[in-house]
Image: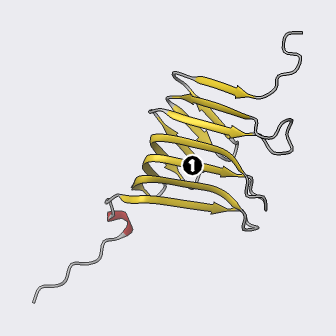
Amino acid sequence: MADAPSPATKEEITAPAYNWSLRSFTKEGFPQMFSGGTEARRIDAHRLDVVDLNLRVFSGDASARVEAILLSPAATFLPDAKIARGDKSVRFISFYASSGPRPGEQVEASGIHWIYQHDQKKISLDGSVHVTFDAELKNLLQ
């Protein structure tokens, strides 16, 4: 009688996950980040390659306000380091806090060759960069 095949270990899993999502929360239990995509493939224990990345950054408090949205057709996501990066296009939208100068103000940036570092709340773009401000700029030409 032949032995049954052994179950696959975590290191052997290479099939993609479809309609993938990952949520992270603060130690107080408030939403901090949502990451999702139409497909994610685990490259190693600390890296996922994601198709149609949708990353949302929350305020991390009881308001659960969305502070930023990042969209890209192809990205690498490092969940432990809270870093996303890619060589294809990215669209990044950052919303000002409701206590800011004007509720609803935002900055939108797009480009290629990018990296988003969540702990620093920083995005770097290095190609075909386009930035749009929807904000009041007082005394700009004085």
Q: Which residue is mark 1?
A: 55
In the rendering, at what x and y percent does residue 102 appear?
Answer: 83, 36
Q: Residue furthest top?
A: 142
Residue 95 shown left or right of residue 82 in the figure: right
In the rendering, at what x and y percent does residue 87 appear?
Answer: 45, 33
Residue 137 shown left or right of residue 29 in the figure: right
Which amino acid type corresponds to the residue marked 1 in the rendered image? Leu
- Observer-nearest of 44 and 60: 60
User: What residue lies at 32% left-to-right and 59% top-to-bottom?
Assistant: 14
User: What residue lies at 78% left-to-right and 58% top-to-bottom?
Assistant: 63
Q: Secondary structure at mark 1?
A: strand
In the rendering, at what x and y percent does residue 52 appear?
Answer: 44, 46
User: What residue lies at 57% left-to-right and 28% top-to-bottom?
Assistant: 125
- Observer-nearest of 11 and 62: 62
Q: Residue furthest bottom?
A: 1
- Observer-nearest of 51 and 82: 51
Residue 139 shown left or right of residue 114 in the figure: right
Quadrant position of the N terminus in the picture: bottom left
Quadrant position of the C terminus in the picture: top right
